[in-house]
């Protein structure tokens, strides 16, 4: 879905290994997961809109930097050689984290599409799930069980944190994914998820 949307928008083939636009699209897809609620209609249409919007912004921003004259940039204290390095490094780090996160989730049979579908639609529910995911990631025994059993140990979490099993079951895919995110210390994604919540 992400590759198809990006490729269609750009009008060219998208390489998942080194295309900055693909990284932007992945980030946008995650943003769509976080911000979606049922009032916005079909999730896939909403996600497509978010991806295309972020790609437009990215292309516009790059065009502005490319159009700026050397004098304007150096007068503003920006070193030309540093611009590309900073943007490339951040984008590359984020892309690496997203791809590593995707691979990590595969061992739990979770794809980004499943994560999008199973993510809480309301902000307060999502915030609570993020907090629970963090607490699970911070507990050695619980996170070990997550990796050992390849699922969320609902009963253990319920007892330990005094949270009803019903609440945990409703958001189990999202909580598990968030726990993995925090446990693996995907710094850029953590900063992003904290900002969105």
Image (cartoon, rainbow, N blue to C red):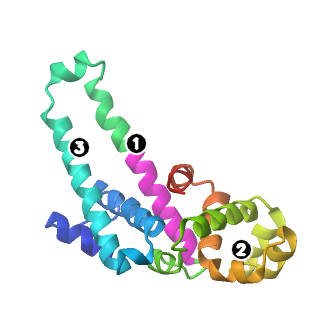
Mark 2 or mark 3: name the one nearer the start of the chain: 3
| Label 2 environment density (alpha carbons within 10 Å; few <14, some 14–19, many ≥20) | some
Residue 183, relative to residue 166: is it above or below?
above
Q: Is residue 13 visible?
A: no
| Disc 1 target residue | 89
The residue located at (19%, 47%) in the rendering is: 60
Q: Is residue 77 left or right of residue 107?
A: left
Residue found 36% across the figure and 58% down from its top: 23
Q: Nearer the viewer, mark 2 or mark 3?
A: 3
Q: What's the CA distance linking mark 2 and mark 1?
A: 30 Å
| Among the two numbered marks 2 and 1 on one chain, the one whose residue lies closer to the N terminus | 1
Magenta-colored span: 90-106
Q: Position of residue 40 (x, y in %)?
A: 36, 74
**Residue 147: which disc?**
2
105 is within the stretch colored magenta: yes
Quarter-of-image position of residue 163: bottom right
Question: Which quarter of the figure is the C terminus placed in?
Answer: bottom right
Residue 196 as seen in the image, left or right of residue 142: left
Q: Earlier in the sequence, mark 3 or mark 1?
A: 3
Q: Magenta span has 163?
A: no
Q: Is residue 5 left or right of residue 96?
A: left
Give the CA separation, mark 2 to mark 3: 41 Å
Q: Are marks 2 and 1 in contact (CB under 8 Å)?
A: no
The residue wearing badge 3 is: 61
């Amino acid at each position: 879905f992400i590759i198809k949307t990006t490729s269609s928008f750009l009008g060219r083939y998208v390489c998942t290994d080194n295309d900055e636009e693909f990284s932007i699209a992945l980030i946008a897809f995650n943003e769509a997961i976080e911000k979606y609620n049922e009032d916005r209609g079909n999730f896939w249409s909403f996600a497509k809109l978010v991806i295309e919007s972020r790609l437009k912004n990215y292309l516009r921003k790059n065009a502005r930097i490319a159009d700026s004259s050397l004098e304007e940039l150096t007068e503003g204290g920006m070193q030309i050689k540093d611009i590309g390095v900073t943007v490339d490094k951040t984008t590359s780090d984020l892309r690496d984290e997203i791809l590593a996160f995707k691979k990590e989730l595969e061992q739990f049979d979770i794809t980004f599409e499943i994560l999008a579908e199973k993510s809480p639609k309301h902000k307060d529910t999502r915030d609570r799930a993020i907090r629970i995911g963090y607490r699970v990631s911070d507990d050695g025994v619980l996170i070990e069980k997550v990796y050992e059993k390849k699922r969320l140990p609902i009963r253990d979490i319920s007892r330990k944190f005094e949270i009803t099993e019903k609440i945990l079951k409703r958001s189990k895919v999202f909580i598990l994914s968030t726990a993995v995110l925090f446990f693996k210390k995907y710094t850029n994604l953590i900063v992003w998820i904290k900002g969105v919540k």
